[in-house]
Image (cartoon, helix red, strand yellow):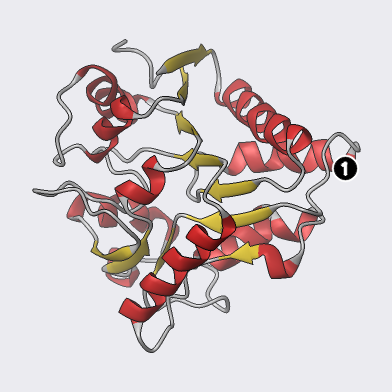
């Protein structure tokens, strides 16, 4: 596990965008695993700049997103479909047919999970997976549990996650309680992983992820077992390292 400490969120965002751009330049038909939330926003802004400056081309790229709220569709400005369109997809030349997002409005959610997992497998697997980390150590929506969930699955969101995500909604009551998420095994099968951490509130989970025991109660700890993980964290998130 490589640890890259940077001084600011802006530097973190640029460094992360460089990882994505390098992957796509070296392999134009790359399969990217993408994350949402506040931490990757700066990275996406930097990627858009790189695309606009002719540095990177996304025409042949395929993307798979980590997760989506159950009950929210693209019409909702809190859905991750909407997030990805606003923060990335509407601003680069990725083909619409190459964008893959879990469908939070699927009539049969279990079937949706199986089919999403099958699409990832048929693509050949993820070349690069971008991750954030929750205050409780979750990656994707893989919450602290007594076991690691292997494949794409339905998640009951942890109280800490609901509280953290409530800042994006008008009230905590509006935060969905369930989501679809790639499982730990799916994430761990990515050839390369880049995890982004920003802010003092992430410092404890970052420390435990790197130096703690590998336990389902801290899902990110499983990344210790992956052969190619880069953690990029700003000074605040790295304060315990």
Q: Quadrant of residue 72?
A: bottom left
Residue 88 can be seen, yes or no = yes
**Residue beneath disc 1:** 52
Which quadrant: the N terminus?
A: top left
- Residue occupying image coordinates x 17% and y 46%: 144
In this view, 28 is above or below 84: above
- Residue occupying image coordinates x 40% and y 25%: 227
Percent position of residue 92, x then y: 79, 53
Quick check: 109 left or right of 159?
Answer: right
Instruction: Label 1, secondary structure: give it.
Output: helix
Other residues around mark 1 within 10 Å, as few (<14) / some (14–19) / many (≥20): some
Quick check: 27 left or right of 195?
Answer: right
In this view, 166 is above or below 32: below
- Residue occupying image coordinates x 78% and y 55%: 91
Residue 235 can be seen, yes or no = no
- Residue occupying image coordinates x 73% and y 48%: 29
């Amino acid at each position: 596990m490589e640890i890259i400490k940077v001084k600011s969120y802006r530097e973190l965002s640029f460094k992360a965008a460089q990882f994505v751009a390098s992957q796509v330049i070296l392999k134009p038909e790359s399969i990217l695993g993408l994350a949402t939330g506040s931490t990757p926003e700066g990275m996406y802004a930097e990627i858009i700049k790189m695309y606009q400056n002719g540095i990177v081309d996304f025409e042949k790229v395929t993307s798979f997103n980590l997760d989506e709220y159950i009950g929210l569709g693209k019409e909702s400005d809190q859905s991750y479909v909407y997030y990805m369109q606003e923060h990335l997809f509407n601003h680069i030349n990725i083909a619409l047919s190459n964008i893959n997002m879990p469908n939070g409005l699927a009539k049969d959610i279990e079937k949706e999970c199986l089919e999403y997992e099958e699409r990832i497998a048929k693509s050949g697997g993820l070349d690069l997976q971008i991750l954030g980390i929750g205050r409780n150590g979750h990656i994707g929506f893989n919450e602290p549990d007594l076991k690691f969930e292997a494949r794409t699955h339905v998640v009951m969101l942890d109280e800490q996650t609901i509280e953290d995500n409530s800042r994006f909604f008008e009230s905590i009551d509006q935060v969905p309680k369930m989501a679809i998420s790639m499982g730990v095994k799916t994430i761990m099968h990515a050839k390369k992983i880049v995890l982004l951490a920003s802010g003092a509130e992430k410092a404890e989970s970052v420390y435990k992820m790197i130096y703690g025991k590998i336990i389902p109660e801290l899902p990110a700890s499983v990344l210790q077992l992956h052969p190619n993980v880069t953690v990029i964290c700003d000074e605040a998130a790295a304060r315990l390292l």
